[in-house]
Amino acid sequence: MNCNEAGTLVARYADGEVDNLQGRSIEQHLRDCASCATKHQGVLALRAQIRAEVPYFPAPPALRERVRALLANAHDATPARPRPERDRWRWLTGGTLAGCTATMLAWVLGTAVIDWRANEDVALEAVATHVRATLNNHLIEVASSDQHTVKPWLSARLDYSPPVQDLANEGFALSGGRLDTLGKQRVATLVYHHRQHTIDVFVRPEFVHAPSALRTVRGFNVAHATGSGMDWLAVSDISPDVLTEFVQRLAQKAASQ
Ligand SMILES: [Zn+2]
């Protein structure tokens, strides 16, 4: 294995995505080659740093309201007895309806928390993938602004066919595409350029844990849209409103085709 081959595999090796044979070859190369070993350490360090900097999100007011509404309904169903607002939470765990309501509450909280974690993970993974592709100079595997070249290339390598279009006349030029792994799925990544900025758009069949709205991770914005039976997840350092509008436009256009 030479440095070129190792270079294309280093990131996948760090993610445990290479087979045994490739794994052994690259391990051997990393032992012998200081330059590739440094690159590998860089990928590991970046991943650790991104993991360490994931912010913790407290429950939003909307969820608190949902839980309150559930409690209020359950409360209405029991013989009325005035109760100070402050006691409601305690009443929930110790009261007559504790079993039923606590189960519902646990379900609501559990589901919501799992959704957020999964959303955060997808947004985080998308940013890490974008950064890694940029660092490794591996943004594009099929270079073309022609949808009739990019789409078949991607379709041949995936079990779905991602809609592909060039929006150059709207200021977003298609530069090509590549394959990535997101949420343990192989996904199509479309690469666009807007002025000097690169935009990665991950396209995959609609997925349960898609980020609900806009996220900012380590200075990158992540915007999400659905359309044409696909999830569209855009990552870039362009402004959040421009990115959001672009990804919505892309999803919309695909749906109208
Ligand atoms: Zn090397």
Image (cartoon, rainbow, N blue to C red):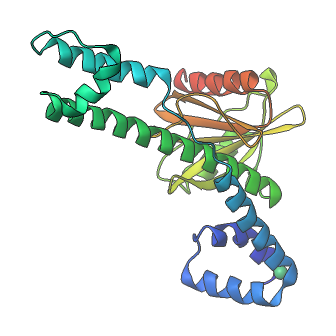
Q: Position of residue 62 (x, y in %)?
A: 45, 20
Nearest the camera: 151 or 54?
Answer: 54
Q: On the image, which quarter does residue 145 sit in?
A: top right
Residue drawn at point x = 31 percent, y = 16 percent: 69
Q: Position of residue 129 (x, y in %)?
A: 68, 53
Quadrant where the C terminus is found in the figure: top right
Residue drawn at point x = 48 percent, y = 47 percent: 160
**Residue 166 vs residue 161: left or right?**
right
138 relative to 119, above or below: below
Q: Is residue 140 visible?
A: no
Residue drawn at point x = 46 percent, y = 32 percent: 229
22 relative to 111, above or below: below
Residue drawn at point x = 87 percent, y = 78 percent: 35
Q: Is residue 28 visible?
A: yes
Nearest the camera: 82 or 244?
Answer: 82
Quadrant where the N terminus is found in the figure: bottom right
**Residue 81 vs residue 251: left or right?**
left
206 relative to 71, above or below: below
Q: Position of residue 140 (x, y in %)?
A: 76, 53
**Residue 36 vs residue 181: left or right?**
right
61 relative to 193, above or below: above
Q: Name the residue at the right extreme.
A: 196
Figure quadrant, ligand 1: bottom right
